[in-house]
Amino acid sequence: MLFSAKTKAFFLEQNEHAILLARASSSAAPLVIEELREVSPGDAAALAEALRQLQPRKPPSGYLNAVCGVYPPRRLVRRTTLELKRAKEPGYFTELLAQQCRVEPDKFTVYAINAGDGTDFDLAKAAQKDVLFCGLPSDDIVAAQDGLLERGVYPDRLELGSVALLGGIVDYLAFKKTKTPTLVLEIGAETTHSFIVSAAGVESSRPIAQGLDAMVPVIQKELGLKDEESARKLFFSNTFDFTGMGPALLQRLLKELQSSIGFYEVQTGQSVGQVVCTQLPPKLAWLGTSVAGALGIAKVEFDLRGWLHARRIALADAADAAVTDARWLGLFSLMVQTVSSDAPLAEKKA
C-alpha cells in the first residue's frame, strides 16, 4: 500500500559494519516503528532496494529524507573538565582541543555539551565544568553528507552517532534505575572508542588505537596462515570459532581498557560493573562476550522493548521481530530524543 511521505519519518544509522534503517509513523511521540532494515555499507544495490521497500512511492526530489547518525573514523567525542576561571580567556578552548584532544582546531567543527545531561554548554552561564567535546574534521562532514546523497538519502538532520548512542545508553540506565558504571565500546577497524557512562551522564572517554585490524596479524600467527589477507578473510567469514582465541586477540586492547578502568575507579571510588560493545555484527558478537569475561564484568542485556515502550515508542510486529540485540540501540537513540514523555503510547499496528 502506498503512503504519503509527509506522514512518515525515516531514520538511518551508518557505522563501519552496517547501515540500519527504520520507517516510523511520525518523527515525534507517540510513534510506531513500522519497519527495520539492515544492509552492508558496501552493498549499494541492497541499500537501494531497502530504500525502495521503505518508501515505495519515490519522492519528487528522488531522495529519502531521513534523520541520520554517522560514525566517521576521525570523530571526536571527548569528555573534558574545564577550568571555569579560564573558560572565557581567548584561545582557551583552542588550547584544550589541541593539547588534550590532540586535534587541529582549525580543521575541526566542534560543539560542546554538558557531560551530565547533554544540554548545550553555555559559556555565559557556565556552571558545569565537565563537558563533552563532539566533532569531526570539517571535510568529513561534507564527505558524510555527500556519501548519503550519493546513496539516495537526504539528511534532514545529521548527527554524530556516538553522541546519540551515549545519550540513549544514559537514558536507558536511568530507565532501569541502574547506578552501575557501564563501559561502552565502539570497536572499529583501527580505533576503539571507549566510554564509561552512568545514569548521571558520561563519566569518562578515551580513544584507543586498537581495533579489529590489530587482531588480524595475531590470527595469522596463531593459525600459521600464509598472509594477513587470508587471516582477514577467515576472521570476517563466520566459518571459524575464534572464541578460544579471544584472550590473545584482545590482549593489547584489554591492557588499555584495564588501565582506563583502573584510573576511573581510583578517581571515583566506583567500580565499573558491566560492558556493552555496540555495532559489532552478529558474526563478531563473541568479542563482546570475550571482553566481558576477560574484564570480569557482566555483559549488558538490554530490554530494548521495555525502554522504547517507556519512551512512547511502539514496535509494529514486523519491526519487533527484527530487534534482536544492542546493535539497534544507536538507531533507536536517534528517535528517543524526539519523544515527549507526556505523550500517550502510540497504538501498535502491524
Image (cartoon, rainbow, N blue to C red):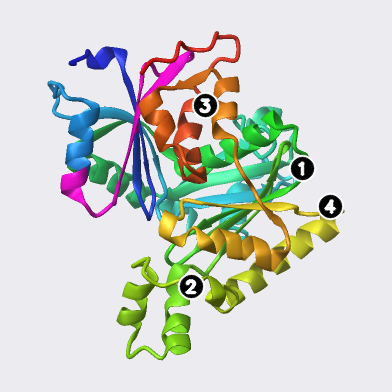
Residue at position x 42%, y 19% from top? 32
Q: CA distance from mark 4 to mark 2?
A: 35 Å
Q: Crowding at label 3, few (<14), some or many (≥20) Cα neighbours within 10 Å? A: many
What crowding class fits label 4: few (fewer than 14 Cα within 10 Å), some (14-19), or many (20 or more)?
Answer: few
Rendered image: mark on residue 196: none
| 25 drawn magenta | yes
Residue stretch rendered in magenta on the structure: 22-46
- Residue where numbered disc 3 is placed: 336
Residue at mark 1: 85
Q: Earlier in the sequence, mark 1 or mark 3?
A: 1
Q: Amino acid at mark 2?
A: Phe
| Residue 242 - label | 2
Which one is closest to the eye, mark 1 or mark 2?
A: 2
Q: The N terminus is located in which quarter?
A: top left
Q: Which residue is mark 4?
A: 268
Distance between mark 3 and mark 2 Cα atoms: 36 Å
The Cα atoms of the two marked residues, 1 and 2, are separated by 52 Å
**Residue 175 point in image, percent of width and height:** 68, 29
Of pointers 3 and 2, the one earlier in the residue sequence: 2
Structural crowding at the residue carrying mark 1, measured as other residues with C-alpha within 10 Å and reported as few (<14), some (14–19) or many (≥20): few
In this rendering, the answer to whether 119 lies above or below 25 is: below
Name the residue type under label 1. Answer: Lys
Q: CB of mark 1 within 8 Å of CB of mark 2?
A: no
Position of residue 242 measured from the top left corner of the image (x, y, whole percent): 48, 73
Q: Earlier in the sequence, mark 1 or mark 4?
A: 1
Q: Nearer the viewer, mark 3 or mark 2?
A: 2
Q: Mark 2, residues whose alpha carbon is within 10 Å: few (<14), some, or many (≥20)?
A: some
Circle 1 or circle 4, nearest the eye: 4
